[in-house]
Structure formats: structure tokens, C-alpha cells
Image (cartoon, rainbow, N blue to C red):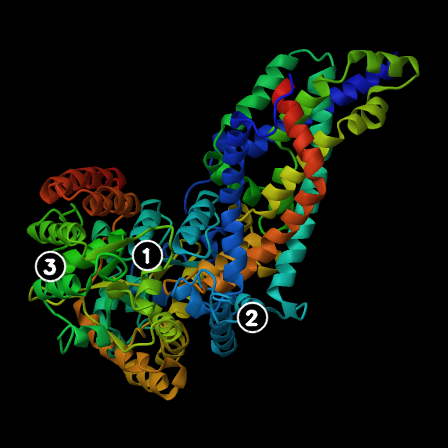
Amino acid sequence: MRALSRIHIYLTAVVALALVATACSSSASNAPAAPAGAPTQPAAAAQASVSNPPTSADMVDGIQLQGKNVEVTYWHNRPQQDQDLLQSMLDEFNKSNPYGITAHAEIAGAGYPDVYNKVNAAIQAGQPPEMSVAYQNQAAFYRAQNAVIDLTPFINSSKYGLSQDDLHDYFQAFLDSDKNPQFSGERLGFPTQRSMDVMYYNTDWLTQLGYNGPPTDWKSWEDAACKASDGQNKYGWAVQHDASTFAALVFGHGGQVLADDGQSYVFNSPAGVDSLAMMQRMFKNKCAVEVPTSEKNGEQNRFGAGNALFVFGSSSGMPFYQQAVTSGGNFQWSINMPPTNGQPAINLYGASVSVYKTTPEKELASWLVLKYLGEKAQTTKWAVNTGYLPVRQSAKQDVIDAYKADPKWGPVADSYAKMVDWAQYSKVESPVAGYDPVRDLIDKQVMTRVMTDSEADPKQILDDVVNQANQILQENAPKK
Amino acid sequence: MKVSPFSPGRTAIYGVLIVGALLSLLPFVYMLLTAFKSYGDVVNNNQWPWPPFGAEVPQFGNFPAAMQQIGFDRQLGTPLFVRYFLNSVVVTTAIVIGTLITSVLAAYALARLNLPGKSLLFIAVLAVIMVPEDATLVPKVVMMYNLHWYNTYWALIVPFTVNVVAIFLLRQFFMQIPKELFEAAEMDGMGHLRYLWSIVVPLSRPAVLTVALLNFIWSWDSFKWPLLVTRDTNLRVLGVGLQQFKSGEGATNTQELMVFATLVVLPVLVLYFLLQRQFREAVTTVGIKG
């Protein structure tokens, strides 16, 4: 009986432990989170006059790295082949930098949302990486938690920063895209790559329709799309509906998604209404076809098969478009800027790299890694191997030459050369915290709505969504 | 009265079931067919590009291409697929074994022992099922950092070695075993543990195997958690490898993605076919009498 009792107690204990473990593993939401953005190591190693993060170029100049053997990690979302390329570049940096910095690249996910989730969890744990890829709005969200730092003092540092020649060599639009209006123009990221939303078009088909070049204004573009459509298999425009496509239309119509000061959404402007009305009209007249969100890259496949005259997509997809066309319809194609109403504009893609608040030494080491990756040799190499744009003007010709010399790129090389010149017209969708839920609103309540409801009032739809978006903006605005 | 196998009611039921079965098979058929298509056939949306409807040959080259795409493991000297596969096997096996141990013990306690507050404990177990996984994700990741388990096998395995659904399923099954059996076993000198091991578990084989199978599938498919709590490629599992085919802004080589998906799904299918009788029995039993 005593033995039975002991076993009874033993089993009770096991069950209790199992239940406690279950509760811990599954409902730990009450666990207190570590302070966001807390340094992983005490900043005592830095000189006393250097705050964390450094707030002036002088402070950055005062950081000493020699003998510290600082290690930094860079989280990104590129596939394994790009990871190998990136790490090979970092290996070079590790060997050549005079400060003993060691940098590692790590795949933190297959897409930007994966990296975003991982970074947020790491911030909550007080252990962010030293660097990660981040779109401007994501960087703003991290900054609101005091987790990423302003890179301006590092860029301006006389000892570690960029020279005036370097600064002029960078595409200004790329550099400016990281100045965040919600945080007084702080640079919450640094560009090591960029791409843009371009218009892919089927040259052969356009010629058959009687055009000797891509339409450059929206009216003739819509006419061409409608001429091309048979309403069954072939369409003028295959629409991948997401907020970026809508933003590209708004930019092309002369509008903006967000006000310059970052204080309100303004895509219910006449440019937004015209964009939406055009889209609604094209669906009503069967000039456009929706690509379901479940059909990843469906617009590319339809274009490659010769079933869509126009599609909008990231310029980084050009090698894949080339592959799709060669394997599919095998026709002549090219890219152009989206049509405009007079003022050229293009939606800038490609996330930057943000640096997290750790220690001044690690922050400086991270900056030096970014500076290295932005140098002409590295940005050229990255652009040639990935399809992204280089971030320096001096790299432009080398990249174009490399594309032209490699037969696998084919006519992509000429298209690529055109694109580099469009960088000056680039615009950023919305670099503010809380843009992700707004993107969902635009997709589901704006684009999806006009695709399926030909009677809906575009102005009313946009007014409603802008109201909701502004509420989200207020909720996510930095606390004064 | 004997019901004719071809009665209108039965025919309608079979018809619905056959349609349902075919619909559930469609994704697998699409996956398999696409794995052997050329990129051109994917782009042109050719459903069957091979004879007699087309002139293409099956693209077996997609398999080495997918292996190349996923990258190379310099340490093992093999494609990274092998590393991902081995990690998935290790992690899944450990989780299945761990879950079986904890859930059998907890379920037995909840079904048979006279514990104070047992009903309350059971309600607590059920309550945990109601908590959405996403709500606990970040706190769990923070715990892994705080325990210094980030980027270790511990983080991949330990949080999943206790599973409330498994406890619930087994408890329902154990409840159906007559109490008299325990009384007889007790008279033969058996204690709880021996009774559990020698009588309850063998009698509950379908439920235990179902728990093992379900946990195998959940663990084998996992993506988000392994990505959040690891940083080294050496610790990544198949689900993470699979997602890499979808990365980037450019495009997806769908046929290579489907090759990889086929290789990921294959072990689950094999295991299911081996255990389907027990699986069906357990689900039916618990579903009807539980």
C-alpha cells in the first residue's frame, strides 16, 4: 500500500510537471518581456563621452575598435546561393578590415515578413542582431521601440564615414529613401541594394496592335490594354493586387501614398481616385485580369506565356521574366517606366539594412560592414549576381557591361541599362510604422473591391480606407 | 433488412465521398505532375505535357536542379537537403518520443488517478488548446533566448515534447478501458506504472500510434518556429529549406519547389499508409465514444 502511495505521488508529480511544462510552452504570454532594444552587452567598453547610440559624428570618431575583435551578424532573406555570395564578400571584409571585425551573414527567413517576425521576437528578448534587412516602415517600427539607430552620425564621421565624393556617388534617391519623416529625418537604414516597380511589356504584341513603342500616358496605355484583351485568355494587364501595385499607379498619376511630413495618408487624392477608377473600368471592360494572391508570380507566368500585354513587377525579377519568356511564348519584350500624367515617377523597392542598438563598438562595426558592402566593387558584384540595382552611379557601367558580356541575360542587359537612369524618379510608398496593416487594407478594401464591384464609388472607397489608415498611423506614431 | 449496396442513398454518399477524396488528392497530383514539368510547361500552364497529349519528356533533371538550388553543405559534403532531412528526422523523432512519454503519463493520471483537483487540471489542459499559437509565439521565443537555448536542438525539441491535444486524445481513450482491468491487475500485484505499460498502452495502440503520427506530421512540417529559434543553416529543418524556394522578389521556379515539396511530403505519406488502420480506428473510437 505504501508502495502504491509512493507511485501515486510520483505520478502526480509527473503529471503536474507535464502540465506546468505545457502551460509554460503554450501560454507564456504573461511572461514579462525583456526591455526592447536593451544592449546585449554593457556599453561600458565605449569611451565615457560616447553615448549609446552615438548621436554625433564626433562621438563616432571617438569609438576605438582596435583590439576589440568585434563580431557582428547580418540577418537577411536571400536564398542560399546569395547567402554564399554575401558571406564570401564578408569573408573578404573580415580579412581586409584593420579593426579585427568579423561579420557573418545569416538567412533569417524566406521573405521580408519572416525577417520582420524574427527581428521583433529578438527585440522583445533584448537580443536583436547587429544588422538586418528592413523596409523603411519596418525600420520605423523598430525605431519606435528604440531598437534601431540613426546612421547619420556614422555617415558623417570624419574617421569612419563617407567622403563627399562617396556621398555624391550614391544614388541620392536611394540614400534619401532611408530618411524617416516620423523620426525627424533620421536615417534608419542604409541601402546596399535597390530595385523598382517597372512595367514589363510584350514588344511583338504591341507592334501587332500598331504601336511602335510602349504607351507613356495612362489613356493610351489603357487603350492598348483593351485592344489586346479578348476577355477570355488574353488580357492587356495581369494584375497582381497588392498595395505596391496600387502605389505605382498613384505615383504614375502624380500622387503620393503618404504626405511628405509622414503625418497622414493622402492616397484619396485625385491621383488615387483616377488610378482606382481606371482599374475599375479596365476590369469592367475585361481589359485586365486578376492574378489570385495564391498564384505566386502568376502575372509573370501569364506574361511569359504571351497571355498578358503588360504587367508591373519588381525589376529584380527581370532574369526570371527572361527565363519565363524564353521557356514560354518566346517573344520580344522589354521594360519601361509605368505610364505617367506628365511627371515621371517610379515605386522604389528593395529593403535597406538597419543597425540595431547594441554597443557603440558593434554599431560602428556594423556601419563599417555596410559601408564596405556599398563600395563600388561589392555593389557591382551583388547587382550582377542578383538582378538588383547597384547603389552607386560609378558601378552602373560595370554592371551593364557584365550583363551584356554574359549571354544568359540576353536582351535583359539592354533593359537593365535603361532602368538605372530611372532611379532619379523613384518614390517611397510609406516609410512609417504601421504600414503593413495599411497595405492589407489597400489590397483587400481598395483593389479587391474595384476588381469585383464595377459600381462602387472609388472616391468613397478611398476616403473610407484613408480614414482607417490614418487611425493606424496615429496608433503607431512615435510617442512624444 | 439488408440495404442494397447500390441504393440511391448509398450511391449518393459514395459519390460525395469519392468527389471529396479526389478533391483532396488534387494538390498532391498537382505537386507530383509539376515536379516533372519543364519551366516552360509551368509558364504555359500545360496540365499534361507528356504523351499522348504532349511531346515533352518527364524532367527528371528537376531533382538535381532543386538540390543545387537549395545549396551545398560544405561540412557534410552533400546538398543541404541532406542536412535539413537529418535535422528533421532527429527533431521529429525526439519530439514524438518526448510527446508520447509526457502525454501517456499525463493522460493516464487524468483518466485513472484520484488526484485532488483533477477536473480542474483537465479544464486547464483544455484551456491551453484554446490559446492561439501565434499569441504565444513571441513569449516562447523570448523564453528560448532567456534559457540560452536559442540556436540549439533544445529549442527545436523541448517546447513541443508536451502536447495538450495528445493528452486529451489519450485521456479519452484511456477512459474507455474498464476499471475492472486495473482492479484485476492490482490483485496480481501490479502498480500503476506496470499496469500502464503492460495493459493500458498495448490496449491503446491505435491512439498511441495516432498521437505519434499527428506529432510526426506537425513536427515534420514545422517552419516558423525553427526559423525563429535558429540561426545556423546546420540546425535548419526541411520546412525552412522548402521556403527558400519562395524567397526573393523575383520569381519562383515552381517545378523545383514542387520537387522539394514532394521529397518533404513523401515520408509523411509513407508513414500514414503504414499506420492508416490504427489512425482510423483511434479517430473513430475517440470521435464516437469520447
Q: Is residue A186 above or below residue B179?
A: below
Q: Nearer the viewer, residue A424 or A207?
A: A207
At which x and y percent is residue B113? 74, 15
Q: Is residue B143 visible?
A: yes
Disc 2: host chain: B
Tell me: B106 left or right of B38.
right
Q: How many other residues sit within 10 Å of disc 1, few (<14), some (14-19) or many (≥20)?
A: many
Question: What residue sits right under mark 1 in the picture?
Answer: A135
Give the quadrant of the N terminus of chain B: top right
Q: CA distance from mark 1 to mark 3?
A: 24 Å
**Mark 2 lies on residue:** B68
Q: Quadrant of residue A16?
A: top right
Kindly state the secondary structure of the residue where label 2 is placed. Answer: helix
Nearest to the observer: residue B41 or residue B154: B41
Residue lying at the far right in this picture: please name it.
B188
Position of residue A324 in the picture relative to residue A8 (left or right) = left
Disc 3 packing (10 Å; few <14; some 14–19; many ≥20): many
Which badge, 1 or 3, comes first in the chain's sequence?
1
Q: Nearer the viewer, mark 1 or mark 2?
A: 2
Mark 3 → mark 2, Cα distance in angstroms: 44 Å
Amino acid type, residue under disc 1 in the picture: Tyr
- Residue flagged by tag 3: what amino acid is it? His
In the rendered image, residues at marks 1 and 3 fall on the same chain: yes
Q: What is the number of the mark on residue A253?
A: 3
Q: Amino acid at mark 2?
A: Gln
Q: Does the residue at mark 1 contact the one at mark 2 (Cβ under 8 Å)?
A: no
The residue marked by circle 3 belongs to what chain?
Answer: A
